[in-house]
Image (cartoon, rainbow, N blue to C red):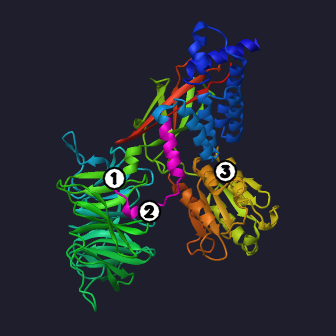
Amino acid sequence: MKHRTAVLFAVFFLCSAAGGFLSAQTASAGLYPTGEYRSAEESFAAQEFRRGVQAFYRGSFNEAILQFEKSLSYLPEDNLILDWLGKAYYHSGLEGTAIQEWSKASQSGYGGLLLLNKIEVVKERRVAVSEDEKEIRYSESGSFPGVFNGEMIFSAPVSVLPNSNGTVWVLAYGSNELLRLDVNGVVIDRVTGPLNGFDSPVDIIRLANSNMLVSESAGDRLALLNGNGRFIRYFGEKGRSAGQMVSPLYLAQDSRSNIFVTDYGNMRVDVFDSDGNGLFFFGQESSGFEGLRGPTGIAVINDIVYVADNVKGCIYEFDLAGNFRRALVEENTFRRPESMKVWQDYLVVCDSNKVFSVDVNTGAVYENMNTGNAPSRLTSAVPDINGNVLVTDIQANEVYVMSKMQELVGGLFVQIEKVSAEKFPEVTLEVKVENRHRNPVVGLKETNFYFTEDKRPVSKLKFNGSSYENTYADITLLIDRSVHSRKFTEDGGVETVVRSIAKSMQGKGTLRIVCAGKIPAVEYAGSPEGALQFSAEGLRTPYSSSVPMDLAIRLCANDLINAAKKRAVIIIGAGKTTLNAFDKYNLSETTAYLSNNSIPCLYVKGFDNSDLDENLDYLIRTTFGSEYFVWQAEGLDGIVQDILDIPSGTYSFTYTSALSTNFGEKYLPVEVETYLMNRSGRDETGYFAPLK
């Protein structure tokens, strides 16, 4: 009976997996069509393969590698096993080995363009090239038109404000309204302001307290809105004194929460406090400065205020008190500059039909995009959560979605991360969608996905939710017990960090504490409330001059792979590593293990606010993390929220399978295609139903 079960399993596997468990000799001999039994090697390979697939979906990637290697020992040339072995190595952070296994399968004719594209994307990600965003060219990947099928959606879009969930607020000058659109351009909310409505709105920004502020050029005022766009009250009024304006245009806020407004009618910049009280204004003629003539775009970077002048075609620089510093960009560089937004550490300026970036240190100007010769007047360009740039064209009545050229050519990187079939025929999938540079794609809807099983559409598809909507996080704190961090611990810095983060989690999620000593060890795992009175004296891990940070990080990540979709490792230490920190797994493999499993790494450093060493700096940047100083003025309460705000592009679906399982022994294929405007991506995988 056992022998017959193994044979049946092998036969059904042959039927379902193209290129899998079918050698060239067997295929040419037509063994399956004649009904002859498979060899013992093929049966043993199938059994090990099944165990490997199950281990993979449990997140036990090392176990999966072992099972797939055993399976290959019976069938060394089987392409399906090679493909899955590559997947397991990829999720273990060993991308070079994964590429080798995938390449073997691809060279045998397996996987087609889909596998070739996967190999190309992973190779591209492994090349540590630092892109200079200022010099990157963007092209249109889609647009949100103001008129669709003859029906007006909005009129004269003038400014946009992206949200962390992939939606975007569009401020329409012509129709005096504020609309919220999803990533597909569908209107999901429409705001007309207070009872008397908006009066020629021009710009919208998000304030430090998450409220929004809209400038009304014809109303000579600012409208304060909550995060959902509901009106709260007005700031300012018409006039020439402090707190008064004539035709306010663009907005910015500094680190002290003061609000800066370009006052076009008064040819100056008005300054308000966070409560809307007028403080002062600046920009008039002074010694060495002729005064503003047409102030438009405004931005604040590192407490320096930058103001664009559309009459003089230049950008001026002021301090927070309004004192003139210099002309950052000389006169007549631009034709008629409009808004000016902060983009990383430089300025993005809209000018007629072009968008430029400006280096705030040198004043160098780079052209990033051009809408061509068609009638166009670009007024606002802002990066969204998905790495695109949203550009408003008030004359063409469109909002353009601009993407990097290589993203348009390469499309989306789609991976079916997990398949759960315990309740078969009900099947639940987790799908991760990224661009080519590992940036998660946020905000997709059910309409962006198309699922098939064995190339036939699935039935009763249900969208369960998206990871970016999660409201809590699982966090692992990694305490550095190297000699470098000893003083930091003894001075109470580690206790401050642990207690602050435990408190900020508000009893939600799971908190783990791991110590990175000579041998990494778990010190605590449970509710955040259990660490509110954390004491470093209770740590069992001794200090060491030799700390394998790679092993400690992997220990942290192992438990997070199956944790909440919002999760992170937070390293607490002095910002240095010991000599053998990445001996077992090099830095690239360590960061890949975190990144390929969507686990960002953050760092809280002690002693002083000096730079992290190059290893830690690379680790933090590559995994979309951030660094903090234990004694920073704003405190550490915001770290948990920062983790929740990190983009996450995992989506969950459930469908009802119509496939035959052969009592759980048959490999069941499933495919997904993801579409977003002019880009798409695809993945194929398979799973096993429970044995019966």
- Determine the residue positioned at 31% across, 55% down: 170
In what element is the residue under mark 1?
A: strand
Is residue 562 toward the left or the right of residue 403 in the image?
right
Residue 582: x, y in percent? 69, 58
| The N terminus sits in image quarter | top right
**Counting residues from the N terminus, which is met first, the one under dot 2 or under dot 3?**
2
Residue where numbered disc 3 is placed: 557
Occupied quadrant, residue 103? top right
Residue 87: x, y in percent? 60, 38
In this rendering, which labeled residue sits more in front, label 2 or label 3?
3
Q: Is residue 234 above or below residue 645?
A: below
Q: Is residue 401 above or below residue 344?
A: above
| Residue 432 seen anywhere in this rendered image of the structure | no
Q: CA distance from mark 2 to mark 3?
A: 32 Å
| Magenta span | 115-138
Residue where numbered disc 1 is placed: 402
Residue where numbered disc 2 is placed: 210
In this rendering, which labeled residue sits more in front, label 1 or label 2?
1
Occupied quadrant, residue 307? bottom left
Q: CA distance from mark 1 to mark 2?
A: 26 Å
- Determine the residue positioned at 60% across, 75% down: 609
Q: CA distance from mark 3 to mark 1?
A: 35 Å
Q: Name the outermost residue toward the top.
A: 34
In what element is the residue under mark 2?
A: loop
Residue 646: x, y in percent? 52, 55
